[in-house]
Image (cartoon, rainbow, N blue to C red):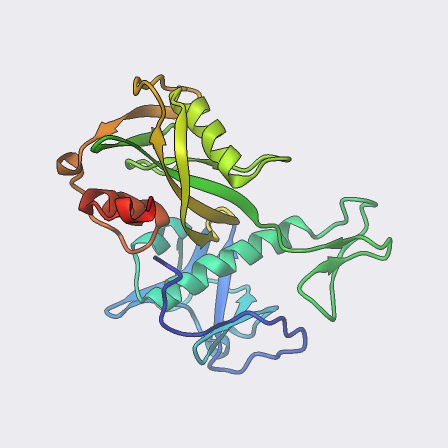
Amino acid sequence: MVQDIGKTFYNRYLPDAQAWAEDAVICFRENAVLLAQREGGIVFPAAGEAGGAGAYLFTVGDRRYFLGEAEPFGDYAYREVSVLRRSAPRETVFAGVTALHLYRWYRDNRFCGRCGKPMRHSVTERAMVCDCGNTVYPAIAPAVIVGVVSGDRICLTKYNRGYANWALVAGYTEIGETPEQTVAREVREETGLAVKNIVYYKSQPWGLSGSLLLGFFCEADGGDEITVDHSELKEARWFSPEEIDFPDDRFSLTREMIARFRSGAWRETML
């Protein structure tokens, strides 16, 4: 998955960090990111090229990353952030996706939600603080990804908007819920199916939506007739392993779980 970078991700908050010329700067304009597409994959500009940098973000391996603002130059252009899903190298993609999470959080917390005054960066931790005493930390929304299995088939869905390919049942955890309760509720709401034997598989940080994805496999309980909630989904149906003709993209938890079902390895999770 995108976070499996084989290098240390060092996300300690360093408020006094100053960018060196060779440090990477990631610049966003809403849903676009400044990058160059070269033979070895995507490249973010260096601080020396971009004319400086803003807030320190994190370090991946021995490369430090900062937020920044810059106009397009040379072969650097603003491209939709969806390009990250189709890019390499993995550590650069992971940095871009994680930076997007922080960029949106900083953007959305410029003013205090309690009193309306401007917020400022904490000098001790990654947080935005206000004189009124309000402290806001990066928002991380827990969400579930669910592989619902009936016999030798898995339920795949297509969303009404956003991601256009076949996926798994998914949804955000609501107040007062455990992730397992979210699994049962989301499957029931989207497909009309009851489930049993809910088993946790794996998690994934998902900066594209500011989420922490929690993957579960479960089994249909009782009937397997699907009733699609068309306010959420375009389509949902059962697939056998032979009908699944797309590979693990090595990016998303969804694709890894589908590939695990197709190979039969999902049964190991249920033991």
Q: Is residue 232 visible?
A: no
Q: Given the current orientation, which residue lies at the most extreme right position?
A: 132
Question: Which residue is farthest left?
Answer: 242
The number of numbered discs placed on residues in the rendered structure image is 0
Is 247 in front, or is 35?
Answer: 247
From the viewer's perspective, is 149 left or right of 208? left
- Residue 140 at what x, y percent from top left? 57, 50
Q: Position of residue 195 (x, y in %)?
A: 40, 28
The x and y percentages for residue 239 are 21, 31
Q: Residue at x 34, y 32 (%)?
A: 219
Q: Is residue 102 left or right of residue 189?
A: right
Task: Determine the residue located farthest toward the front in the rendered image.
Answer: 271
Residue 38 in view in this figure: yes
The image shows residue 160, relative to residue 98, as above or below, that is above
Residue at 28 percent of width and 35 percent of height:
166
- Which is nearer the eye, 92 or 255? 255
Q: Position of residue 201 (x, y in %)?
A: 38, 49
Q: Nearer the viewer, residue 109 or 21?
A: 109
Query: Which residue: 33% across, 54% down?
Result: 251
Q: Quadrant of residue 95?
A: bottom left
In the image, 18: left or right of 267? right
Q: Which quarter of the figure is the N terminus placed in?
A: bottom left
Q: Is residue 70 above or below residue 153?
A: below
